[in-house]
Each structure stands twice: as C-alpha cells, then as structure tokens.
Amino acid sequence: MIDLRLLREDPDRVRASQRARGEDVALVDALLSADERRRSSGVRFDELRAEQKSLGKLIPKASPEERAELLGRAEQLKTEVKAADAESDAADAETQELLLRLGNLVHPGVPVGGEEDFVTLETHGTIRDFGAEGFEPKDHLELGQLLGAIDVERGAKVSGSRFYFLTGVGALLELALVNAAIGQATAAGFTPMLTPALVRPQSMAGTGFLGQAAQDVYHLDKDDLYLVGTSEVPLAAYHMDEIIDAERLPLRYAGFSPCFRREAGSHGKDTKGIFRVHQFDKVEMFSYVSPEDSEAEHQRLLAWEKQWLTSLELPFRVIDVATGDLGSSAARKFDCEAWIPTQGKYRELTSTSDCTEFQSRRLSIRVREGKQVRPLATLNGTLCAVPRTIVAILENHQRADGSVYVPEVLRPYLGGREVLEPVAK
C-alpha cells in the first residue's frame, strides 16, 4: 500500500498514477474522505475519553448535588464514547479497505499506455535465418515429441488442458535449467530457498495478488489457503511482521517452487504446447533493500536476468513495460522477451519489478536505521520460468534433423551432452 501521508500531501500525484494505470481515479477522493473521517472520529473519541477520565476523578470529590449532575453526564459520555469508538473503527476499516485497492505509485519514467505501448530498451543476440539454412523451423511441441521430452496428450488425459508431462530428456532439461539458474544466483550472493506452495490469505493479499490478479489464483476453500502463482509470494511474506537491521541489507533470496495459475482470460491464447500452462516450476529472485537503493537494485536484477539469457545463447530484447500493463504492486517493470522462431515474435521469458515500499507496508516489514524504523523496499525478478525457457531453447537451437544444440552452461547438468537427439519411434 502507499503512504497515507503522501496521499494527503500530494493527492494529484496519486490521481495521475491511477489515471496512467487505467484504474479508478475516484478511488483517491473516496480514500481521502475516509481518511479524514478516520482522523476526525479518532480525535473525537480521544476528546470524549479524556473528558470521561477527568469526570471520573471529579465524582468522588463532588457534593451530593454536583455528583448527581456529574453521574448524569458520565452516563451520557458512556454512550457518546461507544458511538465515537464505533465510528472510528468503521472509518478505519473503510480507509484500510480502500487503501488495499489502490495500486503502487507508478515511477515517472514508465511509458504511459496499454500492453502494446512498451518501450524497447535493448536487443541482444542474432535471430537465425532458417530459410538461409535451408529448412523450416519446427515448433517446440513437435521438437519435444521428437526428443521424447514433452507429452501434452497424457497431461490433458490426467489433469485437463494446459497440463503436461516432461519426460526423459525433457525432465533432465528442467533439472539442468534449475540447477544452472540456482548456481548463477548463488554465485551472485543469493540465498537459495525452497518455498511453500500454499500460503495464508494475509501472505497472498500482502504481496498484492488478491487485487487485480485474484481471478488467476487457485484457492482451497476448505483450508483457506492459496496456491502460489510465483515464489515471490512466500519470499515477500518470509519477513512479515519483522524489523530488519539496516546492516543486514540487502537480503537476496533465490526461490524455487511450483507455480499455479488459472490463466483466466487466456482462452484461445497459446493453447498449443507448454508456453501458457496452469502449473510450472520457476526460479525467482527476491530482494529486500533500503528504499533509496531500489532503483539500483532493479538494474542489478535486470543485469542478472540478461546474464542468464545470454548464457543460454538466446536472442532477446528488454522492454520497459507500460503503465497499464503493470501489476498493482509494481512501480516499474522490465521484461526480457526471447525470440520464438515459429511465432515470429518476441515473448516474455523473465520480468523484474520494483515494488518500492508497497508490499512491505502491507506485510509490516520494516528496517531499523539507528533509532528510526521505516518500511523497506522489495523487488522481484524471474530468473528461469522453466516451460517457456524450454520453448525458447528448443526452437532457437534446433537443427534440421530435429536434434537440439545444448548451450554450454547446461552441459555439466546434462551429463556433458552437447546435443539432444531425437528418440527412435
């Protein structure tokens, strides 16, 4: 959530952020009104309680005539205090509810617009000309079937659409990717973490995933637990309700977990293969830093993502995501999109978001600097979303005979294989 003091001091900035996101600007004025009622009712309650306490001291010393009058006022005050307390609680609850609906303040450098209004910042690698090489590229599903690596038919039989099995070398390729990604993250100073896949509502809400993203989340009603769509959620909630000494920052974690997404609203999109699925594994980077260091940390996370994709020898570009395509927690987000030959376009493989103090305020995570205690900043960055990375590797590194070149960074985890070969029918 944002700082209420900032809202009061500069409501136009918050209105501009909401407008840029394409979200409800009227929410800002509703929140200002609720906050004013919360503060005024709180003051009224405090005044009445002070009078009540003062009266309590006077009654024992009063004359019989005065005591009767004071007792009458005390009874009246009792009713007024109860009413003021209820009014204060109601105003506070409304303020909190409205505050949780407000998105993070957009960074002033973010391009304004919708999904297609991003700005391309960098392009890396060379897109292969398969025509010049004399063959038509196969898509990842055909390659995966030739390699005995992907089985979507049995995935659908067992679990339904958008589920799959990684088999044989496909399963080994996932393990290679995860180990290589964790290896890079550990070398960069991240603490590797295996995180829970089920979290409580306060963890999910605190991270910002029960707002605009709620329709994509799986909920277990009987247990009131949520399946995570990313290990960002448990990593963000890891230090919930804690105060961290400034000397410990930055704290950096690399979480590996299964991820579950309904993919609501994606009917008809990417239905073939394993690009858009309901369950996948991912290595996620997560950082806790001082607010002043969040922009620099954002660039560091992006650099680690570029290092990873470069090590996989994939052609990719970096985009500055537009305001209307930001998640509610992100003040700014950079995506790395790999070239997918059979689609003829770049598709998102990794993203990194600067969430500034938005999540830490909701999760009550603070930093102690001397005598001062204040919210810190949180950031996240995908290092390896496994299925999409497999898609990009198979399609970009394929050969005419259906075999696939193995990037050098993965070979130690694949028994030294330099090429993945089709299996005999």
Image (cartoon, rainbow, N blue to C red):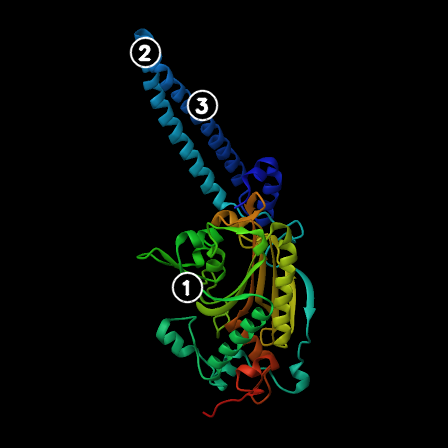
Q: Would you name the residue on which mark 2 appears?
A: 67
Q: Which quarter of the figure is the C terminus placed in?
A: bottom left
- Give the label, 2 or 1, closer to the camera: 2
Position in image of residue 97 (x %, y %):
45, 42
- The amino acid type, in three-letter code, at marker 2 is Arg
Residue 146 at x, y = what percent?
A: 49, 86
Q: Is residue 254 above or below residue 92?
A: below
Query: What separation in Å lies between label 2 and label 1 (alpha carbons)?
Result: 64 Å
Kindly identify the amino acid type of the residue bearing the numbered disc 3.
Glu
Please give left or right for residue 424 compared with residue 130 in the image.
left
Q: Are marks 3 and 1 in contact (CB under 8 Å)?
A: no
Measure the alpha-carbon separation of dots 2 and 3.
21 Å
Question: Disc 3 to disc 1, how far (Cα)?
Answer: 48 Å
Q: Secondary structure at mark 2?
A: helix
Q: Residue at x 60, y 36 (%)?
A: 9
Residue 326: give x, y in percent of width and height. Answer: 57, 55
- Residue name at image x 31 percent, y 7 percent: 65
